[in-house]
Amino acid sequence: MYIKRYTISVILFVLLLGWYVYGFVTQESIEIGFLGFSLPSMPIAVLVIIPLILLYVATVFHMAFYSLLGSFKVRKYEKDLEKMMISVGDALLCKENRHFEFKTPKYKQLGKVIDHVSMIADAQMPSIEDEKLANILRVVSRVKSGEVADLRKFSLPTDNELMIQNDKNRYDAHELSPEDVLGKSGRYSKELCMRAYGDASKKSAFSVIEKNKEFMSHEALNNILSRINADQNQLDLSNQALIELIGMLELNEKDYISISQALSKSMIPEQRIKLFELLSEKDDEATGAYLYTLYDLEMQYHANEILSNTQANEYLNFKAYRALKECNRHYDISLFV
């Protein structure tokens, strides 16, 4: 019952009761004494309605007290609802270490779950009234669909999943160049930096390639090798520079042989032989590629001399090739690797 309506009802009831007592029961007045004190003489009708007035005041205080408690409880739920919206938004933004303190039991349980889950909004997400959450949903949807979105207002760290995806979208949209990414590699994911380095290895100057060689990949190395003495985007690299770039990768014998094959069309024989001689001195896995290079360039004597100093069970393929050559059988060395 609303207090205003209750008050009007009580006033009407008190007036009617007082009128009835005074008009139809008695119009007498009496004097009341209390603890040696005497109160002024009052009509009995007034004395009848005084307890009702006191009861009204008590009930109003009672109702106001519990109404205040109820408003505090409702306020807790409203505050928890606001926190819940923020928590859902943070989950959609892929924020880490989320933790919200909720006051009400139901929201506490739900909050514990949301703090430890990831959320994905699909394309059929209906519109919602909360503008902040609706804006987050729009932004997340754009990023997930491959579009570029402005995430600066969300203050997300560079290693945030959404930031990483948005940086990829910016790179795909040519808002970021390979040089932009590599110039500030600390701000971008390693995956994007390696992709940018792979693209930079096709056209960028050697200074860019050398400075960012920590992002070397097999693909990038192949791009660099293809540019040596090429007609376009040519790179003129010393053996030492090549060795440093090659050394960024863990290569096996087949990888080294593939490098030799790639250089066979562009590098002068003397430099190629020296390169693999140096590589074989640094890494035993490159010895097979050194042998391949020597045989490929018809340097039989030097290759045979190296084979003579190996164990009986080593480089059997090259020893088979050597045996065939000694029998005047001529085969392409590539068939033996």
Image: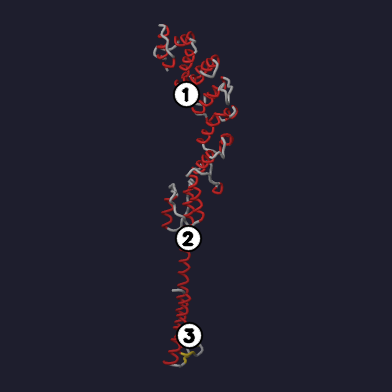
Residue assigned mark 1 = 251
Residue 143: image tag? none
- 2, above or below 195, in the image: below
Mark 3: which secondary structure?
Answer: strand
Kind of residue sitting beneath label 1: Leu
Whole-percent x, y for residue 170 in the image: 54, 41
- 231, above or below 134, in the image: above
- Direction front: furthest residue: 231
In this rendered view, identify the residue nearer to me: 61 or 122: 122
Position of 55 with respect to 204 (left or right) is: left
Quadrant that contains the N terminus? bottom left
Q: Of discs 1 and 2, which sits in the foreground?
A: 1
Real-space Cα separation, disc 1 to disc 2, in angstroms: 61 Å
Residue assigned mark 3 = 34
Q: Of discs 1 and 3, which sits in the foreground?
A: 1
Mark 2: which secondary structure?
Answer: helix
In this rendered view, identify the residue nearer to me: 17 or 1: 1
Real-space Cα separation, disc 1 to disc 3, in angstroms: 108 Å
Mark toward the start of the polypeptide (2 vs 3): 3
- Which residue sits at x=51%, y=52%? 135
